[in-house]
Amino acid sequence: MRVETKLFLYLFVFFVPITLIYGFWSKWQEPIGVTALILTALLFALSGFYLAMTGKKLPLRPEDNASGEIEDAEGNYGYFVASSWTPLWLAGSAAIMFAGLAVGWWLFIIGAFLAIVAVCLWVFESFSGEYSI
């Protein structure tokens, strides 16, 4: 987690002077922008601190080792479905639902029914055996 920690802490260090530059540029007359930049910097500091503390408790990962080899990170990364048409059907039903907000509730209900079917198909598309669809 050392790479992520450095990334977040570098972004914190970046946003602190940007906040000061923005404040001087706007003559501190715009409190919303300054507040947003301060909160952004604090968010990066909080995330970086969390990752630093969590990284101390965990063992080094292969990508944290500067002299690591590609073979060190090999292994099972999970199961991914090769291709699927179901997200297309889900996007189409979402489009029907959004059109139903403008046209009428009857179209929204039809799109919601199609979305429920598409979500169920997407969830169970890689199941096989007794619980397959």
Image: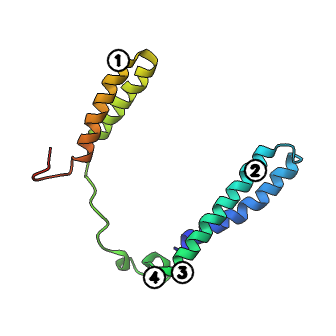
Q: Amino acid at mark 1?
A: Trp
Q: Position of residue 49 (x, y in %)?
A: 62, 70
- What residue sits 28% from the left and 30% below the top? 114
Which numbered tag is attached to residue 35?
A: 2
Seen in the image, is 78 located left or right of residue 99? left
Dot 1: few (<14), some (14–19), or many (≥20) neighbours within 10 Å?
Answer: few
Q: Amino acid at mark 2?
A: Thr
Dot 4: few (<14), some (14–19), or many (≥20) neighbours within 10 Å?
Answer: few
Find out whether the residues at labels 1 and 4 contact each other: C-beta distance under 8 Å. no
Instruction: Name the N-terminal-most of marks 1 and 3.
Output: 3
Quadrant housing residue 42: bottom right
Q: In the rendered image, which residue does mark 4 sit on?
A: 59
| Residue at mark 1 to residue at mark 4: CA–CA distance | 56 Å
Q: In the rendered image, which residue does mark 1 sit on?
A: 106
Find out whether the residues at labels 2 and 4 contact each other: C-beta distance under 8 Å. no
Q: In the rendered image, which residue does mark 3 sit on?
A: 56
Q: Is residue 35 above or below residue 72?
A: above
| Residue at mark 2 to residue at mark 4: CA–CA distance | 37 Å
Q: Amino acid at mark 4?
A: Pro
Dot 2: few (<14), some (14–19), or many (≥20) neighbours within 10 Å?
Answer: few
Q: Secondary structure at mark 2?
A: helix
Instruction: Name the N-terminal-most of marks 1 and 2.
Output: 2
Q: Position of residue 112 (x, y in %)?
A: 33, 29
Residue 89 visible in the displayed image: no
Seen in the image, is 120 located left or right of residue 1? left
